[in-house]
Amino acid sequence: MKYFVMFFSLIVSLNGQIKYDTYFENKTLRIDYFHTGDKTSDEYSFDELREEPYWGGSKTDLLDAFNYGKYKMEVADSATGTIIYSKYYSTLFSEWQTTEEATKYKKSFNESVVFPFPKQTVVVTLYSRDRKNELLKKFVLTISPKNYFIAKDRRNEYPNFKVHYSGEPAAKVDIVIIPDGYTKDEMEKFKNDCNKFAQYLFNASPYKENKESFNIWGIEAPSLESGTDIPGKNIWKRTNVNTTFFTFDEDRYCMTSDYKAVRDYAANAPYDQIYILVNSSKYGGGSIYNHYSVCVADNERSEYIFVHEFGHGFAFLGDEYYTSSTAYLDFYPTDVEPLEANLTTRVNFDAKWKDMINKDIPIPTPNDPQYLNKVGLFEGGGYMPTGIFRPSYDCSMKSASINNFCPVCKKAIKQMIDFYTK
């Protein structure tokens, strides 16, 4: 953890030197692009630029303090070369690269990045990590704010409503909830579901203790049909953002590859995080860091799904389970330290939670209930029974449990809340 504290302190110092009003207006610029590749290669191609009406992010912490995610965006002032904004993130493409399908052919995904609308010309650089998690420069685009090809027309424009409001978006974590598979006649159900799921989030620590650090917005956007796609049962529905079960041929994995639609609907409110609420009772969901999260509305385990998936999307927490099926191959190489705060291969365990383990706890720690509620080094996690270690015997990132984040996960979530709000 000491390495993170040093890096975090440096970024805080640099953030203090970047004045939002010097470089940015109070709205968003979005770059849409295509991401193409296979298991071992990727390339970017430009699609379009769009102006959006809100900026929901911080106006003080403009440089990302967390070395998380598969990708990084940097925005530099063209005249001086000063980095004035940065963001780490992952995408559905980065997950697809770890599937068997990616060993057979290339595929394209639509993706986008957003940042505050610049006052002067900027240079945007996109980076992708290699197998060793080193960042490689992949795409560079120079953008003038006067470019008349920056689209200003609004697609999928709908009213927003406040689910939970604590104050000015720039000083809060703003979550926008997008409905998928709710018809016009089901909009009241969606609003009620938003209230229910907001309470789910605030039932869990450390969110409950930081409730006033959050704003939650809903978008009143009906779909043409109720439900979502279930290809394995030949069920297909016309919905807003085209969510589907059987993503990567995993029955429970409910995601969407229509990211342009996701961004279009999210643009109806200020946001830091996007959550898609699917009008279905089938068990499923998913999440990708700083990309989007998905949860079904009416399953008996929806509360667990909602909070667990937000752990991925918001705080980049890794899955600690290792007995359930996944579509991933070699997701965490055991000779590389994972970027997630709650997983380690022991390649660089000193940078993780080693300093949080009491001296009387054995390392590695036996997978024994006697160590329940103790921070240790338990083997099994990241979809692998051996070679990858987690910090606790049980956690909401391991089992279908509610309000059960371990101390390491709680710390990671709290650090992220503080970054967005202080």
Image (cartoon, rainbow, N blue to C red):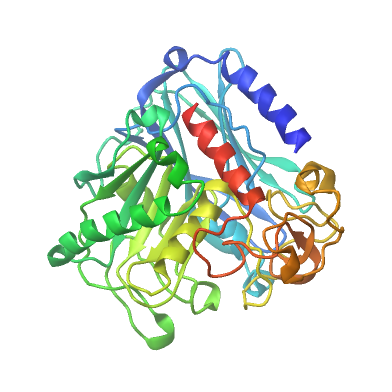
Question: Is residue 318 shown above or below 400?
Answer: above
Question: Is residue 35 shown above or below 381?
Answer: above
Q: Position of residue 312 (x, y in %)?
A: 55, 54
Judge by depth and name the residue closer to the eye, 341 or 257. 341
Q: Is residue 13 visible?
A: yes
Judge by depth and name the residue closer to the eye, 42 or 14. 14
Residue lying at the far left of the rendered structure: 185
Quick check: 378 left or right of 414? right
Quick check: 274 left or right of 12? left
Give the residue drawn at x 57%, y 59%. 93
Q: Position of residue 242 (x, y in %)?
A: 35, 65
Quadrant of the rendered structure where residue 194 is? bottom left
Give the residue drawn at x 69%, y 72%. 322
Task: Locate the N terminus and report the quarter of the image it occupies.
Answer: top right
Question: Is residue 60 shown above or below 264?
Answer: above
Q: Position of residue 325 (x, y in %)?
A: 62, 78
Give the residue drawn at x 62%, y 50%. 409
